Image (cartoon, rainbow, N blue to C red):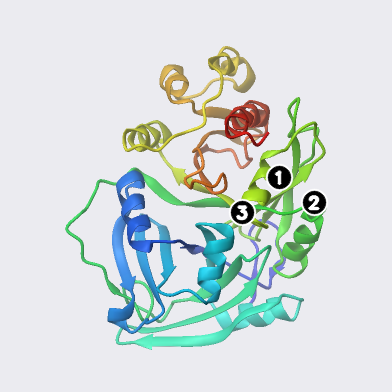
Amino acid sequence: MQQSSPETGLTDFLPLEGTDYVEFYVGNAKQAAHFYKTAFGFQSLAYAGPETGSKDKASYVVRQHSLTFVFTTPLRSQNSMADHIYKHGDGVKVLALRVPNATDAWQQTTQRGAKTYMTPRTLTDDAGEVVISGIHTYGDTVHLFIERKNYEGVFLPGYRKWESAYHPAETGLLYVDHCVGNVGWNQMNKWVKFYEEVMGFRNILSFDDTDISTEYSALMSKVMSNGNGFVKFPINEPAEGKKKSQVEEYLEFYEGEGCQHVALATHDIVKTVTDLQNRGIEFLKVPVSYYDTLLQRVGKIDEDLSPLKELGILVDRDEEGYLLQIFTKPVEDRPTLFFEIIQRKGARSFGKGNFKALFEAIEREQEERGNL
């Protein structure tokens, strides 16, 4: 099933309807789900485990608007899931993409060189059917293709509705804006080629070590986007610097390539970040001097400067508008996975003007950990 891309006019052999869900392999899924409900404002959605016939793992699904996270934990050792957590710690395993035809998505990508993770299979229950297939990407991360047009159930067959008496208020998180992958030395272009040739993505932005560097460290990044722009995957690799970059620190502690952060969209970043801070989420802070010249750099913005300064929210502008963004500190004890909160006011870019201030803030954290 091919369709024309509205952005390029080219035939899109892998039409994507957006991110279906992000699945994390974690040491304790019940506790992880509770944390994301409490701290990020997700709501209980679905559960799979021994009670539903899943004897080797338990999964808790939470949702906020169009944003769905799945937390999965193995119930025994001596399996690939337990090995994944032992090696990487808690982290992203699955970036699931919604497609109109999961069988065709698998055929299109594997015939172009993708390594199969899951051959197409149909899952059914009383609410209909879902077709799922999957391929490997960088590190131990995988893409699942989810076709759910014939399904009316709560999440997927095999899951039941998760009833909970605990319903913390949402925080205004809407959907996945982009997911960033960290890959090893000289591996960025290999994975750029993979997304171009295997999945039909385009490289829409590139940053080298002259764009993303401080006195001590540097990295390079290329942003890959599918035809309609619904799915974006920036790919980072380390670059030579005096000291260890954030990407090197991630690769060392994650023990391999993986998803570094997931960017979550909001329509009111001041309210969202205020709520998240009040619930205990910690954010990177740039020096207050960043705000002294902000309006000269980015021009007029709708927001009052004082709450942005108080919260540490960064602003950048491109030809199409501006964006506001902020990054959490790592949400694990390992300095690996973190989240970005982003509000776009027309801008399609990724905050190039904030890189230096942001990276210096990250380096201060690295230095405290003894990893710079």
Residue that badge 3 annotates: 254
Q: Nearer the viewer, mark 3 or mark 2?
A: 3
Residue placed most toward the observer, 83 or 33: 83
Residue ID at (82%, 38%): 240
Is residue 103 placed above or below 92 in the rendered structure? below
Q: Which amino acid does label 2 sit on?
A: Trp
Q: Which mark is residue 285?
A: none
Residue ID at (63%, 40%): 350
Residue placed most toward the observer, 217 or 74: 74
**Residue 118 percent across, percent down from the top left:** 59, 81
Residue ID at (63%, 25%): 357
* Callout 2 crowding tier (Cα within 10 Å): few <14, some 14–19, many ≥20: some
Q: Distance of mark 3 from mark 2, alpha carbons? A: 15 Å
Q: Which mark is residue 185?
A: 2
Residue that badge 1 annotates: 248
* Callout 3 crowding tier (Cα within 10 Å): few <14, some 14–19, many ≥20: many
Hey, which quadrant is residue 287 in on the image?
A: top right
